[in-house]
């Protein structure tokens, strides 16, 4: 009988570290770990040696930072993807790229199983498995956290200690942290109590806004067709821009999110996110869109962006609808080029100026000075035509819209 060969999505955190040994023992399997480097810092150092020491026969560590920003994060940025109006989707944007990596290596290694360390009530199990099943329907998937005997993270920590499995998590700081260049997601521990204020040790990338510098900092971001290409006039790669904005924004306490969100599986969860670069870039990008995009396209994009964010959050990256919306966003970004200047100060982000050769703003039409070129007489006919259908409804139906008279 052929021995099982399992490719494990390995982060180096508590769950996946325990999982390597557990899978080896449970399935009598050869374990191959796969780590995609999306810009995480804490767990990536010496991760190959750690995986081998934990029981893996082989460990892949693949640097995907360039692909992550240029092929994934930039799509989310151009699409205005903010889940439930806030979350820049740092974790969710990275999952389809990791799913593709897992499938590619499983095929290369002729593995018959892929395993991941997602929980049975989390979002990432859906994102990984939907992506993997779409890309490789014939490969089996195992999610140990849905079936193993551990009932808490405390039990996992004790198991790791018993089997000398190296892990940085302890009982005093039992957070679950996911990090990449686009942001950090933190949950568990005291954060599960919605009445508790997130403690300082729950934040990795940003300072408390109260402790940020007492002097504001001004930055200029240059976009070309919806993509940031320069910071303060200096041309940079996508990775460099994001890394620099994370440093600058983090120093000023920019990009902190404490959110109650609706998970894919139907429950609500409390998440703490840090995404300085993503927050800065989304803020600048939408301001440039308002300057360069016509009203109808901008309004339509608002609804499309919400759908796009939901698709990313729910794990539907590799789908016809996502592909179609991506093409739409790419098309309407053709005019979104120019400079946005912002001020960063103690957690606040203020737009100072907007400049674009493609600007649709006309000062002659907007001004209230004597240079006003707007024909005010046109307004009467415009209003009559705009309200005409509703005038007809009132005349023919005596509709009152549920309003009672405000006078006796």
Image (cartoon, rainbow, N blue to C red):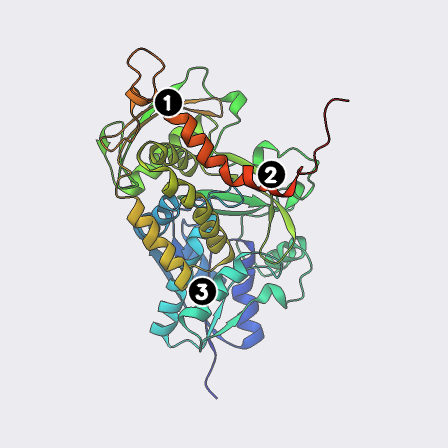
Along the viewing direction, whichever of 86 and 72 lies nearer the viewer: 86
Look at discs 2 and 1 and give the one toward the viewer. Answer: 2
Along the viewing direction, whichever of 302 and 342 lies nearer the viewer: 302
User: Quick check: marks 3 and 1 in contact, CB under 8 Å?
Assistant: no
Q: Secondary structure at mark 1?
A: loop
Q: Which residue is tagged 3?
A: 131
Q: Residue furthest bottom?
A: 1
Residue at left offset 33%, top offset 73%? 108
Q: Earlier in the sequence, mark 2 or mark 1?
A: 1
Along the viewing direction, whichever of 69 and 299 lies nearer the viewer: 299
Q: Secondary structure at mark 3?
A: helix
Location of residue 183 in the rendering, given as x and y in whole percent from the top left corner: 45, 42
Q: Secondary structure at mark 2?
A: helix
Q: Which residue is tagged 2?
A: 395
Q: Residue furthest front?
A: 396
Other-residue count near label 2 (Cα within 10 Å), few / some / many at <14 / 14–19 / ≥20: few
Location of residue 185 in the rendering, given as x and y in whole percent from the top left corner: 52, 44
How far apart marks 3 and 1 lie (CA) works out to 57 Å
Location of residue 272 in the rendering, given as x and y in whole percent from the top left corner: 56, 40
Residue at left offset 48%, top offset 32%? 206
Other-residue count near label 1 (Cα within 10 Å), few / some / many at <14 / 14–19 / ≥20: few
> Any mark on residue 377, and which?
1
Other-residue count near label 3 (Cα within 10 Å), few / some / many at <14 / 14–19 / ≥20: many
Quick check: 212 above or below 280? Answer: above
Q: Is residue 277 left or right of residue 273?
A: left
Look at discs 3 and 1 and give the one toward the viewer. Answer: 1
Location of residue 3 in the rendering, given as x and y in whole percent from the top left corner: 47, 82
Quick check: 69 above or below 380? Answer: below
């Amino acid at each position: 009988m052929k021995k099982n060969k399992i490719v494990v999505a390995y982060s180096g955190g508590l769950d996946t570290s325990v999982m390597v040994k557990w899978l080896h023992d449970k399935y009598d399997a050869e374990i191959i770990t796969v780590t995609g480097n999306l810009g995480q810092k804490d767990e990536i150092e010496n991760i190959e040696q750690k995986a081998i020491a934990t029981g893996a026969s082989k460990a892949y560590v693949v640097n995907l930072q360039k692909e992550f920003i240029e092929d994934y994060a930039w799509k989310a940025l151009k699409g205005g993807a903010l889940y439930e109006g806030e979350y820049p989707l740092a974790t969710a944007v990275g999952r389809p790229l990791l799913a593709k990596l897992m499938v590619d290596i499983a095929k290369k290694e002729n593995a018959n199983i892929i395993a991941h360390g997602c929980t049975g009530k989390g979002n990432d199990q859906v994102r990984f498995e939907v992506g993997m099943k779409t890309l490789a329907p014939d490969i089996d998937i195992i999610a140990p956290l849905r079936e193993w005997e551990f009932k808490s993270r405390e039990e996992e920590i004790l198991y790791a200690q018993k089997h000398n499995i190296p892990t940085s998590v302890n009982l005093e700081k039992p957070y679950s942290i996911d990090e990449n260049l686009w942001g950090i997601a933190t949950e568990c521990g005291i954060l599960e109590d919605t009445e508790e204020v997130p403690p300082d040790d729950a934040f990795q990338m940003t300072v408390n806004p109260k402790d940020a510098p007492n002097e504001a900092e001004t930055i200029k971001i240059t976009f070309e067709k919806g993509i940031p290409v320069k910071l303060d006039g200096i041309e940079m790669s996508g990775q460099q821009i994001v890394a620099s904005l994370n440093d600058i924004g983090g120093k000023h306490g920019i990009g902190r999110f404490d959110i109650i969100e609706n998970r894919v599986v139907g429950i609500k969860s409390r998440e703490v996110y840090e995404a300085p670069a993503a927050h800065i870039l989304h803020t600048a990008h939408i301001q440039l869109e308002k300057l360069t995009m016509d009203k109808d396209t901008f309004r339509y994009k608002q609804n499309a962006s919400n759908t796009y964010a939901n698709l990313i959050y729910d794990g539907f990256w590799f789908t016809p609808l996502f592909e179609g919306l991506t093409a739409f966003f790419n098309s309407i970004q053709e005019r979104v080029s120019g400079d946005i200047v912002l001020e960063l100060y103690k957690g606040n982000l203020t737009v100072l100026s907007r400049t674009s050769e493609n600007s649709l703003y006309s000062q002659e039409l907007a001004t209230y000075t004597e240079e006003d070129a707007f024909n005010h007489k046109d307004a009467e006919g415009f209003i009559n035509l705009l309200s005409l259908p509703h005038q007809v409804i009132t005349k023919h139906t005596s509709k009152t819209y549920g309003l009672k008279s405000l006078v006796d």
